Image (spheres, grey):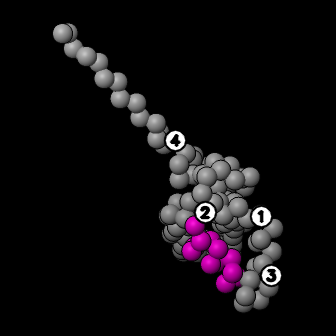
């Protein structure tokens, strides 16, 4: 998956391991850029990062929910104090995605894998 599709598109599916790697990368980039902007332009300048990084975080979460066959509307659980964020965190980090294709796309675990291997045996000259 291209990085633009990964961080900005709201469709598709994302494996748990890919979600962890992408989220860690996103958090590291946010912290680095935030500290740089704070030191160069002041604390208010780093607030400009909240919108793009918030969008990228939501895009990753949506794709992760789609991997489990869940709707984007599941993010509304975040509005329920304590229980909602815990439920979403559990679903994003612990639950395995749907095996095989679901309504949100092909299984990212088996995409581009070729399970069909054909061995051709030819007889040599006899």
Q: Earlier in the sequence, mark 3 or mark 1?
A: 1
- Point out residue 33 in the picture as x, y percentages from the top left corner: 55, 67
Secondary structure of the residue carrying numbered label 2 = loop
In the rendered view, would you say 91 is above or below 8?
A: below
In which quarter of the view is residue 54 placed?
A: bottom right
Q: Residues within 10 Å of mark 3 (few under 14, many from 20)?
A: few
Residue at which label 4 appears = 112
Residue at which label 2 appears = 97
Secondary structure of the residue carrying numbered label 3 = helix
In the rendered view, would you say 56 is above or below 116?
A: below
In the rendered view, would you say 85 is above or below 110?
A: below
Residue name at image x 25 percent, y 16 percent: 123
C-alpha gap between disc 4 and disc 1 = 26 Å
C-alpha gap between disc 4 and disc 3 = 37 Å
Q: Is residue 13 visible?
A: yes
Secondary structure of the residue carrying numbered label 1 = helix
In which quarter of the view is residue 27 placed?
A: bottom right
Q: Earlier in the sequence, mark 2 or mark 3?
A: 3
Residue at which label 1 appears = 72
- Point out residue 11 in the picture as x, y percentages from the top left corner: 72, 52
Residue at far left of view: 126
Residue name at image x 77 percent, y 64 percent: 72
C-alpha gap between disc 3 and disc 1 = 14 Å
Q: Residues within 10 Å of mark 1 (few under 14, many from 20)?
A: some
- For the residue pair 113 and 7, the one nearer the viewer reads as 113
Q: Is residue 12 visible?
A: no
C-alpha gap between disc 2 and disc 4 = 17 Å
Q: Nearer the viewer, mark 3 or mark 1?
A: 1
Specify the segment rendered in magenta: 85-96
Residue name at image x 55 percent, y 45 percent: 111
Asked if the residues shown at circle 4 and circle 1 are in contact, with their CB atoms under 8 angstroms apart, the answer is no
Magenta span has 91? yes
């Amino acid at each position: 998956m291209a990085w633009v599709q990964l961080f900005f598109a709201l469709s598709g599916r994302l494996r748990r391991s890919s979600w962890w790697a992408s989220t860690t990368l996103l958090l590291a980039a946010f912290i680095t850029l935030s500290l740089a902007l704070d030191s160069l332009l002041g604390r208010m300048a780093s607030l400009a990062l909240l919108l793009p990084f918030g969008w990228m975080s939501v895009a990753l979460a949506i794709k992760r929910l789609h991997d489990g066959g869940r709707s984007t509307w599941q993010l509304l659980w975040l509005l329920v104090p304590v229980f909602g964020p815990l439920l979403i965190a559990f679903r994003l980090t612990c639950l395995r995605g749907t095996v095989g294709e679901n309504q949100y796309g092909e299984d990212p675990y088996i995409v581009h894998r070729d399970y069909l291997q054909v061995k051709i045996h030819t007889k040599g000259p006899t």
